[in-house]
């Protein structure tokens, strides 16, 4: 068959045509591309700690080839979005608790990145309402595999719910679930890093030293997915994947040249290498921009300004904070490229350091050396919320959510509404597992420690009672509290339910976690306003400037429930068996005792008549020795003869049975 | 008469105590079947017999496709058309002795049309018109028209539209001139033609050759299908996952427009393979993916050399996340096809074959790596190509690393290597030369149906599944799949999930459907339904509930009930034994006394 000769030329023609086609197509392809940014924000915290917040953003156009052909955007995430029709999603893995009092709650970082311990997942689906639950279940399984975590436990309808108002983009197709007890470790971070184009091989993510991160006071790794519409055309929308890692670290104290102040009062001086043990070796070449920011908070700026004015007499040419941080309070090791200042009077300052391409000789190591002790406080949440359990015993109890006013609310009163009566809105979302049977009619509200009628303060309320073994209970409250409120306490009673023996988790005696309540303040805006709007906005800057409500989480509650004695079935088995054994043993013993009597009668008849004493003694001894006096005779007489043949026979019989059993079973 | 109470007794010993002690164990024995019944596990009736019967039927009578061949001789003067058909069949059976194999044309018939120009003869089973109306045109234009045009012309005449009448035809046109060159061309559709001055005998053998070698076997020298590698997933899906690996993006960054490559190059092929496999194409670009094997610098060749022996270490599965995508969920198979761009340090990189030569394609195909990865997690490998940048000198001056696009043309040359790989995809050439011929697809479909049925019933899944179920007599089988059953909660709580029933039933039906279709000759439909059947059979086997414990073993139940019986058995059995012993002793005494009494 050597006659297929012209195929070669045909093939060349085909190649050529393909080449022509591709050349023409490549000319016309000016479509949007995938983009990636990497940024790091560092912030000294009042309690001698440092907040480092990594922010990676990846964007891809939602085109036809989305989820099939990708250059930078992680294909696995794109396929999740496409397969489960995800409109928005957020997944966070957190270890430790965000300290709202010390680390602040009224800034974009804490509002977005302070998360409840364990895993939190919410997702909005673009599917008909009846398919939302199915999509959620599939998604939890997919994420579970992707992030090496037990997110699949959120599949059960008892673990997730559908809040209405707490998350803005809800519209019925949102599902929310948490796993407070999930332990977070490197096995969750590694797959998260794999989604970055440079992983931890280059760029800012190379800083992520695992021991430093996991010995931190708080770390939260987050994955946030949204669809951003860039134009009127829905086809122009882009999928935005934000990956953030927020770590609160205690820096190792660097001994600086500070002789005149005691070390104890000083803020610890630190540098990137002292926090993470590594320096930045150049940016990820795939990133559109790679920046490091150092944020100096409002409170710190005010303190430094005060300090500066008091020492101005000594320093003739009064230095400015804008002047590359060469001020009285601290000194920065690297000069920033840009200084961004908030619009307001006493405002935070942001130093920007763009990271350059890798050069072997240069390494970026930003450090801060404190020169003067400074004490300041961070902006607090409008109401500081804490939650606790009341009551004792295994039968019933009560949950109390206590909200105390902070200086933010007082500022609000002072600032805007001097004359008129002012209110602000507080949204409370409380989800309880079904075995905490909450009586919603017992909800009480105390404002400034006085009981109040609910309807005076509750604007809207959404309650979906729990259903045993089907769904958790959900309560959403929209409260309108007066600005001058000092404290507000919500109190609700519950009964503790019983679980089926196989519904108990391992180590049930530890107690059961009630997920954190979410307290949000839609009237307060956590965003910062920087003066330098003309310059290009990086994702981090736009995130900091985004107008978003202040959100805070309460603690996770641990409720002890009645736990059964898990060894009960085995106890029952042994007791029943013992009773049976005793019953049959004594029954048969009783039945057999007649033989002995018969024999004794025979003995009495035939033998000589003993004295009464002898008879009593004999009876006693026979009682002590049991039937031995009776039965020992035949056995002892026959024992010598029995040993060899019969015993061997018995042993053989047993062995035979065992072999037969083994063979036939 | 003296009575020794130790050895003799005057009364007969009572049998009552023995009977009483016996009653208790006896009642236990009576109650045992009741207990056994109460702890018996539920097994839903499965069509074991149906599966067995079908499987043995398939073994004894392999699945054959009915093929129809048609030979048209224009300008020949044979005496009888039936003899011609007979001769062709004889020659075909000589050329293709393996026709009894599954997937072959086991039962074929040959029809013949002989149009000598003046008279026309045809066999009874022939469907073609006599005289053949295009004959003259083909003969006339044969030398002038391009092969493609003749192909189309014949397609119009013979009416062989895709999926329609599946008759394979060979048109032999006697060119008259005995010295003229003889050309045989196999067209794109189900026909071939021979032009030129052919002798009658030669024409017959040529025709038989085309029928037997090309149309029946797809030109491949037939080894058994079972031995062949079929990367089609259980659900009939393959994901071709292309990855472009930039070893060091700080040196240079390569990118490609895979969307275009997909649309222009791959989609037409994928469309035509639709009945056999549902192929999807994905691509990604990865960065910082250094190979983990070492290469050495060769002065003579002026390049870095990496031996193919080190291929298992070439792919660093830890850093190269060639993830099995979500789209390939379940048991779809993913073929990973890689393009590796080396870093400036190891550029240019050449692959060395085990025999010491450099690889022409600078790539490796799945067979090598498949063997290498036999025991690793990455079991599905297409292949990889190392693509060296044109200039291996890194630009130290520029701020950003240079960015390049891999053009479609370059990709095509890379694909030449991958073709080696993808050819394995379905035995015969898939990305074959310039096109995917209809007759090739027929052969593919036939083999595919066969393989599906064999993997279904012959060797693997369904039969194995039923054997498995039968060999595990205490495996629980519920009617509803995935239903969790709690058995014997008093003693122990078990999650027993299962299986099978519905899926087995459905896949059996689908398999029967495939067989009936195959005889009718509808290849595509049978390929589709055999794919479904295989998918369903595997579904039942791979059902997650089967994976979890669904086997309440015999020893498990023994261990559960043993404490109960062991404790009770002692006070029940021991009295019987000792009572029986005592009775025998007492009876002996009585017998002794009786004997003594007789004597005295």
Image (tube, helix red, strand yellow):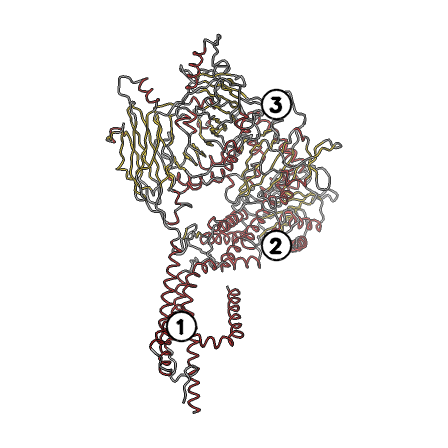
* Closer to the camera in the image, B126 or B294: B294
Q: Position of residue B63 (x, y in %)?
A: 57, 54
Q: Quadrant of residue A612?
A: bottom left
Q: Residues within 10 Å of mark 3 (few under 14, many from 20)?
A: few
Q: Chain of mark 3?
A: A
* Closer to the camera in the image, A511 or B351: A511
Quadrant showing the C terminus of chain B? bottom left
Q: In the rendered view, tell whether residue A92 sits above or below residue B560.
A: above
Where is mark 2, residue-wise?
Answer: B101
Residue at disc 1, secondary structure: loop
Q: Is residue B153 visible?
A: no
Q: CA distance from mark 3 to mark 1?
A: 99 Å
Q: CA distance from mark 2 to mark 3?
A: 66 Å
Where is mark 1, residue-wise?
Answer: A627
Q: In the rendered view, tell whether residue B556 sits above or below residue A541.
A: below
In the image, farthest residue toward the bottom = B600
A256 sits left or right of A114 in the view: right
Where is mark 3, residue-wise?
Answer: A359
Q: Are marks 3 and 1 on the same chain?
A: yes
Q: Chain of mark 2?
A: B
Residue at disc 2, secondary structure: loop
Residue at disc 3, secondary structure: loop
* Closer to the camera in the image, A98 or B412: A98
In the image, farthest residue toward the left = A453
Sequence-first tag of 3 and 1: 3
Q: Position of residue B91 (x, y in %)?
A: 67, 54
Q: Quadrant of residue B7?
A: bottom left
Q: Chain of mark 1?
A: A
* Closer to the camera in the image, A94 or B594: B594
Q: CA distance from mark 1 to mark 2?
A: 82 Å
């Amino acid at each position: 068959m050597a006659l297929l000769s012209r195929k070669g030329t045909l093939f060349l023609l085909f190649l050529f045509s393909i080449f022509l086609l591709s050349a023409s197509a490549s000319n016309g392809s000016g479509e949007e591309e995938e983009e990636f940014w990497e940024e790091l924000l560092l912030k000294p915290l009042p309690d001698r700690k440092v907040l480092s917040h990594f922010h990676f953003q990846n964007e891809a156009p939602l085109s036809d080839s989305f989820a099939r052909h990708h250059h930078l955007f992680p294909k696995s995430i794109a396929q999740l979005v496409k397969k489960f029709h995800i409109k928005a999603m957020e997944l966070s893995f957190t270890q430790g608790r965000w300290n709202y009092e010390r680390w602040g709650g009224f800034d974009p970082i804490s509002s977005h990145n302070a998360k409840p311990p364990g895993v939190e997942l919410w997702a909005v689906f673009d599917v008909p309402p009846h398919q939302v639950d199915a999509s959620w279940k599939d998604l939890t399984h997919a994420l579970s595999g992707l992030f090496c975590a037990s997110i699949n436990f959120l599949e059960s309808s008892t673990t997730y719910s559908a809040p209405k108002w707490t998350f803005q983009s809800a519209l019925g197709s949102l599902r929310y679930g948490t796993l407070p007890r999930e332990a977070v470790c490197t096995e969750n971070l590694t797959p998260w890093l794999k989604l970055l184009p440079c992983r931890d091989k280059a760029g800012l993510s190379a800083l992520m030293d695992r021991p430093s991160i996991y010995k931190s006071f708080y770390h939260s790794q987050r994955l946030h997915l949204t669809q951003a519409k860039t134009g009127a055309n829905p086809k122009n929308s882009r999928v935005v994947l934000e990956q953030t890692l927020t770590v609160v670290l205690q820096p190792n104290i660097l001994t600086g040249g500070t002789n005149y102040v005691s070390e104890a009062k000083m803020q610890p001086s630190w540098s990137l290498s002292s926090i993470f043990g590594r320096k930045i070796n150049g940016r990820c070449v795939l990133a559109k921009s790679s920046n490091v920011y150092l944020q100096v908070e409002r409170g710190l700026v005010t303190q430094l300004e005060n300090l500066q004015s008091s020492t101005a007499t000594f320093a003739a040419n009064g230095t400015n904070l804008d002047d590359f941080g060469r001020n009285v309070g601290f000194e920065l090791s690297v000069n920033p490229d840009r200084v961004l200042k908030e619009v307001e009077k006493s405002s935070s300052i942001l130093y920007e350091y763009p990271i350059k391409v890798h050069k072997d000789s240069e390494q970026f190591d930003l450090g801060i050396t404190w020169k003067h002790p400074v004490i300041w406080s961070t902006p607090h949440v409008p109401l500081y919320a804490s939650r606790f359990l009341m009551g004792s015993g295994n039968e019933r109890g009560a949950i109390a959510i206590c909200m105390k006013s902070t200086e933010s609310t007082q500022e609000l009163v002072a600032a805007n509404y001097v004359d008129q009566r002012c209110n602000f809105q507080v949204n409370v979302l409380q989800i309880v597992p079904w075995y905490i049977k909450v009586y919603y009619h017992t909800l009480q509200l105390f404002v400034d420690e006085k009981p109040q009628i609910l309807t005076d303060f509750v604007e809207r309320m959404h309650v979906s009672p729990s259903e045993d073994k089907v769904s958790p209970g959900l309560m959403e409250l929209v409260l309108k509290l007066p600005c001058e409120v000092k404290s507000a306490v919500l109190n609700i009673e519950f009964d503790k339910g019983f679980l089926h023996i196989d519904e108990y988790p391992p180590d049930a005696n530890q107690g059961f976690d009630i997920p954190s309540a979410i307290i949000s303040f839609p009237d307060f805006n956590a965003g910062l306003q920087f003066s330098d709007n003309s310059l290009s906005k990086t994702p981090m800057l736009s995130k900091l400037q985004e107008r978003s409500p202040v959100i805070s989480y309460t603690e996770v509650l641990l409720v002890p429930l009645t736990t059964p004695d898990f060894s009960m079935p085995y106890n029952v088995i042994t007791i029943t068996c013992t009773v049976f054994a005793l019953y049959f043993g004594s029954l048969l013993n009783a039945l057999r005792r007649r033989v002995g009597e018969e024999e004794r009668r025979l003995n009495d008849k035939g033998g000589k008549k003993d004295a009464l004493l002898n008879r009593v003694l004999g009876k006693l001894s026979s009682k002590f020795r049991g039937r031995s006096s009776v039965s020992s005779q035949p056995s002892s007489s026959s024992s010598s003869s029995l040993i060899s043949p019969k015993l061997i026979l018995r042993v053989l019989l047993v062995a035979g049975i065992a072999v037969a059993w083994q063979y036939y079973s | 008469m003296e009575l020794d109470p130790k050895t003799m007794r005057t009364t007969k010993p009572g049998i009552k105590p023995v009977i009483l002690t016996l009653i208790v164990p006896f009642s236990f024995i009576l109650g045992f079947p009741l207990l056994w019944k109460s702890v018996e596990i539920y097994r839903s009736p499965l069509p074991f017999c149906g599966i067995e019967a079908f499987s043995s039927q398939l073994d004894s009578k392999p699945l054959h496709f009915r093929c129809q061949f048609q030979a048209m001789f224009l300008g020949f003067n044979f005496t009888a058309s039936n003899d011609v058909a007979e001769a062709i069949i004889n020659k075909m059976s000589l050329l293709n002795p393996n026709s009894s194999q599954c997937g072959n044309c086991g039962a074929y018939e040959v029809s013949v049309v002989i149009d000598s120009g003046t008279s026309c003869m045809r066999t009874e089973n022939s469907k073609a018109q006599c005289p053949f109306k295009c004959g003259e045109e083909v003969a006339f234009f044969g030398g002038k028209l391009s092969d493609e045009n003749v192909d189309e012309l014949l397609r119009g005449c013979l009416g062989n539209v895709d999926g329609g009448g599946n008759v394979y035809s060979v048109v032999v046109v006697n060119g008259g001139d005995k010295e003229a060159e003889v050309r045989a061309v196999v067209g794109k559709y189900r026909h071939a033609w021979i032009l030129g001055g052919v002798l009658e005998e030669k024409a017959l053998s040529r025709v038989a050759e085309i029928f037997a070698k090309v149309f029946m076997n797809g030109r491949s020298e037939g080894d058994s299908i079972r031995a062949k590698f079929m990367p089609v997933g259980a659900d009939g899906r393959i994901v071709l996952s292309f990855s472009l690996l930039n070893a060091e993006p700080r040196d240079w960054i390569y990118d490609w427009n895979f969307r275009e490559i997909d649309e222009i190059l791959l989609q037409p092929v994928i469309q035509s393979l639709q009945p056999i496999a549902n192929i999807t194409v994905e691509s990604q670009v990865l960065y910082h993916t250094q190979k983990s094997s070492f290469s050495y610098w060769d002065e003579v060749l002026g390049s870095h050399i990496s031996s193919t022996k080190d291929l298992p270490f070439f792919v660093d599965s830890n850093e190269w996340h060639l993830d099995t995508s979500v789209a390939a969920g379940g048991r779809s198979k993913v073929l990973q096809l890689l393009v590796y761009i080396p870093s400036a340090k190891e550029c240019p990189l050449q692959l060395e074959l085990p025999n010491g030569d450099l690889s022409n394609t600078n790539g490796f195909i799945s067979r090598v790596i498949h063997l290498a990865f036999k025991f690793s997690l990455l079991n599905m490998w297409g292949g990889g190509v190392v693509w060296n940048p044109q200039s291996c000198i890194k630009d130290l001056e520029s701020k950003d690393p240079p960015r390049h696009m891999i053009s479609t043309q370059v990709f095509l040359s890379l694909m030449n290597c991958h073709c080696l790989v993808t050819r394995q995809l379905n035995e015969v050439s898939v990305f074959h030369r310039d096109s995917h011929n209809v007759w090739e697809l027929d052969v593919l479909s036939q083999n595919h149906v066969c393989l599906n049925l064999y993997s279904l019933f012959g060797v693997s899944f369904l039969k194995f599944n039923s054997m498995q179920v039968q060999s595990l007599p205490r495996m629980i089988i519920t009617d509803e799949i995935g239903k969790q059953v709690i058995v014997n909660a008093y003693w122990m709580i078990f999650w027993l999930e299962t299986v099978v029933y519905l899926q087995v039933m459905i896949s059996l039906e689908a398999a029967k459907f495939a067989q009936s279709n195959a005889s009718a000759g509808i290849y595509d439909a049978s390929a589709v339904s055999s794919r479904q059947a295989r998918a369903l059979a595997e579904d039942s086997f791979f059902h997650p509930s089967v994976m979890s414990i669904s086997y309440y073993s015999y020893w498990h139940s023994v261990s559960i009930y043993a404490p109960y019986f062991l404790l009770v058995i002692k006070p029940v059995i021991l009295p019987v034994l000792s009572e029986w012993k005592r009775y025998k002793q007492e009876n002996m005494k009585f017998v002794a006394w009786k004997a003594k009494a007789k004597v005295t």
